[in-house]
Image (spheres, rainbow, N blue to C red):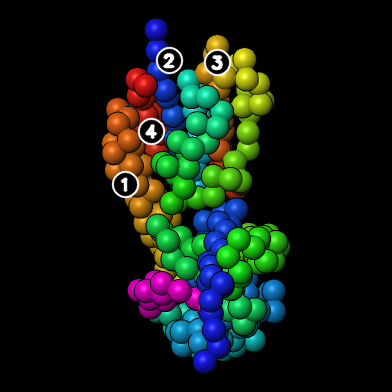
Amino acid sequence: MPCNRGYITNWNWTEAQRPIIDLRTVYLALKKLGIMWNEAPQSLNNWHEARNSLTSSQKVAQRIISLSRLANLVNEIQTLNIPQITLSNGMILSWRNGSYSIGKQERIRSGQQTQTGAEISQFVTNFDAAYASIEIEMQNELDNILEDIESGKSQLAAEEIEAHRARIDSEKNALNKSRQQLRETRMKHVETVGETLGYAIRKQRIGKKIKYVLVRNP
Amino acid sequence: MCNVETIEIIINEDGTMTSDATGIAGEICEEELQKILGALTDVNNAVLRTEYHEPSAGIKAGSAKTHQQAGAGD
C-alpha cells in the first residue's frame, strides 16, 4: 500500500456567480460544455429525450402526449434529491445551503499551494456562462410558446393549448420552487447566524426582495 | 461614543444576495461578512466599495464593503 505520509487530501470549492439550483439547467449546461454528468438520473435523460422529440412535424395527438410526458418528467425531476453530481472532468457539484457549489478533490503535500484552484475557477466561469445562457434559452422558449398561444398565432387546438400550458406551468413552478427554497434557506441562515453573533435583526419586505438590517453595538 | 455596526443584506427574488456594511473597519468587515454569509456564498468574490481601501474613511465614517453576487437582479 502506498504511503500517504506528508500528503493531505483537500477539497477546493468555489461558488458560481449565480445560484445553481435547477437540475435541468445543469444538465443542458453540461451538454453545452461537452462534459458528462456521470450516472445522471434516468428521469433527466428521459426529459432531455422528450424535449428533443418535440417537433412541429409530430401529429397533434403525438405532440399532446409528448407535452404531457414532459410536464410529468419535470415534476418527477423536481422530487429528486441529489446531494452530489460527479462530472467527467473530475469536478463535483455539491448541494450546500440551497444551491450547488463546484469543487474538486486534490492531494497535495502539506504546506504546498493548491494545484486545482485555477482549474476550478476557470471551470466555474465556463459553467456559469453556459448555465446563464441555458437559463435564458429555456425561459425564452416558454415565453415564445405562451406568446404564440395568447396571440392566436399558433392556431392550435384547445387540447394542445392545454397541454402546452400544463408543460409551461410545470417548468415555471419547478424553477419558482427551487428559488423559493433557496431564499428560505438563505433567510433562515442570516437570521440564525446574525442572532448568534449578537446582532439585532430587522426584516423588511421590499417588493419581492427581503431586506435584513443587522445592528450591533461593539 | 461607539460606532454602531450595521450590515444590510438583501435577498433578491432569484435568491442572489447583496450586502452592505457600515461602521465596521475593512478587514474586520470582511471577516464579519464571511461569518454571516460565508456558508452561503463566496465572500471573497465581493465587489469592494472605494471606502474599503481608505483607512481614514474606515475610522471616521466607518468602512464599508459591498458584497454582491453577480446576476443579482437589482
The three-letter code of the residue at mark 4 reads: Tyr
A78 drawn magenta: yes
Horizontal side, residue B15 vs residue A116: left or right: left
The three-letter code of the residue at mark 3 reads: Ile
Which span of residues is magenta-colored? Answer: A74-86
Q: Which residue is mark 4?
A: A212
Q: Which mark is residue A188?
A: 1
Q: Earlier in the sequence, mark 4 or mark 1?
A: 1
Circle 3: element type: helix
Disc 1 residue crowd, few under 14, some 14–19, many 20+, Cα 10 Å: few
Q: Are marks 2 and 3 on the same chain?
A: yes
Asked if A144 appears above or below B70 in the picture, the reply is: below
Looking at the rendering, which quadrant does residue B49 occupy?
A: top right
Looking at the image, which residue sits at the far bottom? A1
* Separation of marks 2 and 4 at Cα, in angstroms: 19 Å
Using the rendered image of the protein, determine whether residue A204 is visible from the camera's viewpoint: no
* Separation of marks 4 and 3 at Cα, in angstroms: 24 Å
* Separation of marks 2 and 1 at Cα, in angstroms: 27 Å
Mark 2 touching mark 4, by CB under 8 A? no
Mark 3 touching mark 1, by CB under 8 A? no
Circle 4: element type: strand
Q: Chain of mark 1?
A: A
Residue found at x 42% / y 24%: B6
- Give the percent coordinates (x, y) of residue A77: 42, 76
Q: Are marks 3 and 1 on the same chain?
A: no
Residue found at x 63% / y 74%: A30
Camera-side residue: A22 or B28?
Answer: B28
Q: Which residue is mark 2?
A: B3
* Separation of marks 3 and 1 at Cα, in angstroms: 32 Å
Nearer the observer: mark 2 or 1; the answer is 2
Q: Which residue is mark 3?
A: B59
Q: Chain of mark 2?
A: B
